[in-house]
Amino acid sequence: MSAPPAPAPPARPPRTDGVPADGSVRVGVDDRFHRAPSRPAGLQRVTQVAGRAIGPLFVLALWWVASAQAWVSPILLPAPGTVWAAAVDLVSSGKLQDNLGVSLGRAMTGLGIGLVVGVTLALLTGLSKVAELLVDSNVQMVRSMPILALQPLVIVWFGIGEPTKILLVALAVTFPVYINTHAAIRAVDARFVELATTRGLGRLALVRHVVLPGALPGFLTGLRFATSISWLVLVVAEQINATAGIGYLMTQARTVARTDVIIVGLVVYALLGLLSDTIVRLVQRKALSWSSTLQAR
């Protein structure tokens, strides 16, 4: 005689937590957890630019209020309107454009020399243990010296002409490029080097296809530091018996107590630094588009 059939299990009440009634879990992401569609690239770019402008606009507003309320003497800090009038006068007379062109030439020349020297030294010390022993300690010692403290020695060696100004900028640029590029070269994954060696790549091909792409993020970071440092050093370098340049314009204004012209020069330097950093960041974003990194939200 066969056993009676087992009773059917009671029906489960429907669940409200999104899990099927049979207890199974679907593989994937529930529709409720889908990310919201991202904003258009153009709108996001405009938002970023507007957000970065908030800080300078706040400083400008505070400056305007301080001048309007006479919290500070106009001799020490002229009003924004006075500085703007001085800038318009310099532009209309052509003085600002002429001196700006001279400063750009010095900065770009010094930056180019510093980049070549810094990358070359980084490749030597990063790829050769002997070169690191011979070069790195010397670079570190010179890097520890204040660049502007070398100014008297550079004047004795090269005089007070253009080479001195360009050399000071080149020295200042070399060290951040060297440090960051050298560290990036040493951080290249050894497995990539072994794979390239296994595939029969020679020394030059290894550097071109493995070392340089791996060191690119470090180089671009050093380039960001270098561009800002080049303008900082140029401010002082252009006050060494210069006959043109933004620094020379500021020095001439100091002799006649034209604080408004001095502030115009400082603003020009600040804008140049911001512009150069923005350009490097754009290059960094394009060159490292393959890299997946954490983005601030």
Image: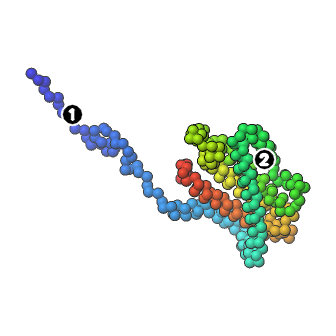
In depth, the one of 61 and 39 nearer the eye is: 39
Q: Which mark is residue 9?
A: 1
In depth, the one of 245 and 115 nearer the eye is: 115
Name the quadrant containing residue 161.
bottom right
Image: 181 above or below 51? above
| Image position, residue 207 (x, y; %) | 64, 46
Image: 157 above or below 203? below
Q: Residue at x 69, y 68 (%)?
A: 64
* Outermost residue to the bottom: 92
Pointer 1 or 2: first along the chain: 1
| Image position, residue 90 (x, y; %) | 76, 74
Residue type at mark 2? Arg
In depth, the one of 117 and 145 nearer the eye is: 117
Q: Residue at x 61, y 60 (%)?
A: 52
- Work out how far the residue at label 1 is from the one at label 2, CA to CA, in angstroms: 80 Å
Number of other residues with Cα within 10 Å of mark 1, as a class: few under 14, some 14 to 19, many 20 or more: few
Circle 1 sits in a helix, a strand or a loop, which is it?
Answer: loop
Circle 2 sits in a helix, a strand or a loop, which is it?
Answer: helix
Label 2 belongs to which residue? 143
Residue type at mark 1? Pro
